[in-house]
């Protein structure tokens, strides 16, 4: 196995992996009554009378079918998600052994309304090699659900929690110890949007709606290199682990992508809109801080920290998304053309890959911008 790591640490890392390779009964620490092991259940949920709906997840940058204003009272929203360990090519001849939710980086966006109950069935197929779980930053207790969802290959688990905090939140795998950062930097995170039941509001408290919504997941990758500079390729997450951990200790990603691949949201796959349309951009970063800028546009409304309870900021040029959170920004396009949606650390955007495009169709408005005279010799 190629290695940039000294032998003692390499063997320790492999030992950690072998612990979770052994098939066994469920690792999730339940108490037999639905609660956390070691604690008596004092309050039972009472959901028998609530309607149940099934949400079908879709691959980012798109969102599942949803309403912006809740239809009726709270519901139990049933979602199924499958953990997939797979090799992905993040740019030509650069491969990673990724760990994913539903096979995409980032994992799919989930959408519910405040007061709904999200009921997730998480599956870890027997073809996988590692133990996995899920930590919802939007949930309350049990390490975000992580302590109740640990499953070995060949197992599935169902978790339900109340979505009581409107906003956009990260979810990610967090199986303990070194495996937490390793799984996250290997692509295993996504986001959940909890909409207010009466919809989004602007800075004056007036209702606002969006015509389109896109979800962008920003991922830092830590890919080992040979002494020649060639990026190494591995056969499994277990084989890659020790070398990747060594690169991670430098805290400097070798690549940064939007939606799993350099250029994933450019060209034919660019996000698309029309002049006059209002677009909601949802952005998550599970590990590193970022700063988002729409070149040629703005953040008309930006919700700090992704919280829809907060009054949105207005007319921002650039907005921050901290590592471990999601952000939300809304913009109404006024001019056609190509817009670049970037991490405005321009080194990371241009040299490492943290950039996307929005292609906007429509008629140009000279009142906003006009080339008064074309380029010509200096007079």
Image (cartoon, rainbow, N blue to C red):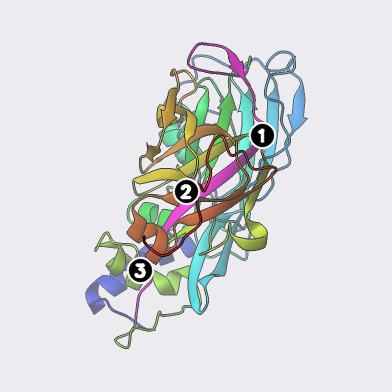
Residues under numbered marks 3 and 1 in contact, where contact means CB atoms less than 8 Å apart: no
Please tell me which residue is depicted at 66% across the width and 38% down the height of the picture: 275
Q: Which residue is mark 2?
A: 173
Instruction: Estimate the spatial distance between the alpha carbons at disc 3 and disc 1, rounded to whole Å.
Output: 42 Å
**Residue 56: where, in percent of width, then height?**
73, 41
Q: Which residue is mark 1?
A: 277
Please tell me which residue is depicted at 34% across the width and 79% down the height of the picture: 225
What is the span of residues highlighted in magenta in the rendered image? 199-225
Whichever of callouts 2 and 3 sits on the residue coming sooner in the sequence is 2
Q: Is residue 154 above or below residue 318?
A: below
Furthest-front residue in view? 379
Q: Which residue is mark 3?
A: 244
Please tell me which residue is depicted at 37% across the width and 62% down the height of the picture: 378
Q: Please, what secondary structure does the residue beneath circle 1 have?
A: loop
Q: Nearer the viewer, mark 3 or mark 1?
A: 1
Judge whether residue 255 can be spotted in this image.
Answer: no
Q: Is residue 286 above or below residue 45?
A: below
**Residue 159: where, in percent of width, then height?**
59, 35
Q: Please, what secondary structure does the residue beneath circle 3 have?
A: helix
Instruction: Estimate the spatial distance between the alpha carbons at disc 2 and disc 1, rounded to whole Å.
Output: 35 Å
Furthest-bottom residue in view? 228
Please tell me which residue is depicted at 49% across the width and 14% down the height of the picture: 42
Nearest the eye: 225 or 289: 289
Query: Is residue 203 found inside the magenta-colored segment of the image?
Result: yes
**Residue 243: where, in percent of width, then height?**
33, 73
Q: Relative to 351, is 97 on the left or the right? A: right
Nearest the eye: 78 or 19: 78
Whichever of callouts 3 and 1 sits on the residue coming sooner in the sequence is 3
Nearest the eye: 95 or 346: 346
Query: Is residue 179 found inside the magenta-colored segment of the image?
Result: no
Q: Nearer the viewer, mark 2 or mark 1?
A: 1
Q: Residues within 10 Å of mark 1 (few under 14, many from 20)?
A: some
């Amino acid at each position: 196995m190629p290695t940039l790591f000294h032998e003692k640490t390499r063997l320790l890392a492999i030992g950690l992996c072998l612990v979770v390779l052994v098939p066994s009964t469920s690792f999730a620490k339940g108490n037999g009554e639905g609660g956390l092991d070691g604690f008596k259940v004092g309050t039972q949920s009472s959901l028998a009378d609530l309607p149940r709906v099934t949400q079908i997840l879709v691959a980012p940058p798109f969102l599942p079918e949803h309403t912006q204003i809740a239809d009726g009272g709270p519901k139990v929203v049933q979602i199924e998600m499958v953990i997939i360990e797979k090799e992905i090519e993040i740019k030509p001849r650069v491969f990673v052994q990724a760990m994913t939710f539903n096979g995409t980086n980032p994992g799919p966006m989930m959408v519910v309304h405040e007061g709904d109950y999200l009921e997730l069935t998480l599956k870890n197929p027997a073809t996988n090699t590692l133990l996995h779980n899920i930590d919802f930053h939007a949930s309350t207790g049990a390490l975000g659900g992580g302590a109740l969802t640990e499953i070995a290959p060949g197992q599935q688990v169902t978790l339900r929690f109340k979505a009581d905090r409107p906003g956009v939140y990260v979810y990610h795998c967090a199986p303990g110890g070194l495996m937490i950062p390793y799984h996250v930097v290997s692509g295993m995170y996504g986001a959940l949007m909890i909409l207010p039941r009466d919809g989004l509001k602007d800075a004056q408290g007036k209702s606002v709606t969006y015509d389109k919504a896109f979800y962008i997941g920003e991922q830092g990758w830590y890919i080992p290199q040979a002494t020649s500079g060639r990026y190494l390729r591995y056969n499994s997450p277990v084989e890659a682990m020790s070398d990747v951990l060594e690169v991670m200790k430098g805290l400097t990603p070798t690549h940064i992508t939007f939606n799993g691949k350099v250029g994933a949201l450019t060209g034919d796959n660019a996000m698309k809109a029309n002049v006059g349309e209002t677009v909601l951009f949802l952005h998550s970063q599970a590990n590193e801080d970022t700063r988002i800028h729409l070149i040629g546009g703005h953040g008309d409304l930006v919700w700090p920290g992704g919280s829809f309870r907060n009054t949105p900021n207005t007319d921002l040029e650039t907005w921050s998304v901290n590592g471990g959170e999601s952000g939300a920004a809304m913009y109404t396009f006024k001019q056609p053309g190509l817009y670049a949606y970037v991490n405005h650390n321009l080194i990371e955007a241009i040299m490492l890959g943290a950039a996307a495009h929005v292609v906007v169709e429509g008629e140009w408005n000279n009142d906003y911008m006009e080339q008064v005279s074309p380029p010509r010799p200096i007079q």
